[in-house]
Image: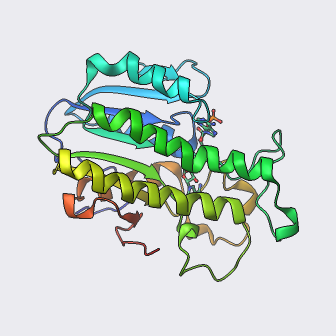
Amino acid sequence: MLDDANATPVLTSFGDGFKTLIFGAMGAIGGAFSDAVGQQANAGPLVTTSRSAGSFAASAQHFACDLVDESSIAAVATAVTEMAPFDLVINATGLLHDEAADVHPEKAMRQISADAMARVFGVNAIGPALVMKYFLPLMARDKKAVMAHLSARVWSISDNRLGGWYSYRAAKAAQNMLVRTAAIEFARRAPAAVIVGLHPGTVDSNLSAPFQGSTPREKLFTPAQAAAHLLNVIENLSPADSGGCFAWDGARLDA
Ligand SMILES: NC(=O)c1ccc[n+]([C@@H]2O[C@H](COP(=O)([O-])OP(=O)(O)OC[C@H]3O[C@@H](n4cnc5c(N)ncnc54)[C@H](OP(=O)(O)O)[C@@H]3O)[C@@H](O)[C@H]2O)c1
């Protein structure tokens, strides 16, 4: 455990030279994950993706990847196959709102739009399913390996007391079902592997910016804090946790 929960933990559970792949590395939390993993003394190669390949962290290998385009996910898998097996795969992509695509979290059911809902499901549920399809086969099987998809507390059906946000809630719930289903199948081939959803808390980012008003300052994490919290969770995961969804403080979240 950490003395300071906000400090980046030292990752020892993957061993030396561990290989990492981070989807959505130009996002707030994805970028913080990339920085934190890059700081680890025992880190091996770090591969990152974003929708547009641009300049990125000096030592990283960076690829363009759009999670609503299966061919672009497949192309990244082909490009990195020779680097496999990976020890840690983090999917930090996600979609809550997008002005340009007319995607807004619904306050009422009359605001549901089939196109917007399909887009939200594409990024938050179908994309993660495709990441599992193409990248679980590239993960280590004889030692601890973790694939983590950024989730959100609002996925929980039993915890839904406020309503609203139909598409995002439902897509994150679908993501967690896909994680659980893949974890059952993959455990037969890789008993030491762990596939999970992770809730980062409320984090200062473009995604949360329009909705931070009701969040007390002390409960709004920086992306660096969120990455530190979640890497601590990842460090402490064991195969018995596979298929679950965990919050930033390690608490298991129920469906
Ligand atoms: N921030 C919070 O308070 C909070 C709370 C709960 C859960 N989460 C979850 O945490 C994750 C990261 O969110 P964040 O706060 O870091 O938000 P962010 O800064 O907006 O990052 C989201 C990332 O998703 C990527 N993305 C969107 N559509 C994509 C697509 N079609 N293909 C590939 N990438 C796509 C974006 O890529 P571009 O850079 O190309 O736009 C961006 O890198 C999300 O899954 C979110 O649901 C966040």
Compared with 52, 9 (above or below) is below
Q: Residue at x 42, y 35 (%)?
A: 22
Q: Position of residue 128 (x, y in %)?
A: 49, 44
Q: Residue at x 39, y 16 (%)?
A: 79
Q: Quadrant of residue 57?
A: top left
In this image, 225 relative to 37: left or right?
right
Q: Position of residue 172 (x, y in %)?
A: 56, 59
Judged from the image, the quadrant occupied by ligand 1 is top right
Q: Residue at x 38, y 68 (%)?
A: 249
Compared with 125, 77 (above or below) is above
In this image, 183 relative to 154: left or right?
left
Location of the N terminus (image quadrant):
bottom left
Q: Position of residue 75 (x, y in %)?
A: 47, 19
Q: Which residue ends up furthest to the right in the rendered image?
A: 110
Q: Nearer the viewer, residue 98 or 156?
A: 156
**Visual colour scheme:** rainbow
Q: Position of residue 173 (x, y in %)?
A: 54, 63
Q: Residue at x 53, y 53 (%)?
A: 222
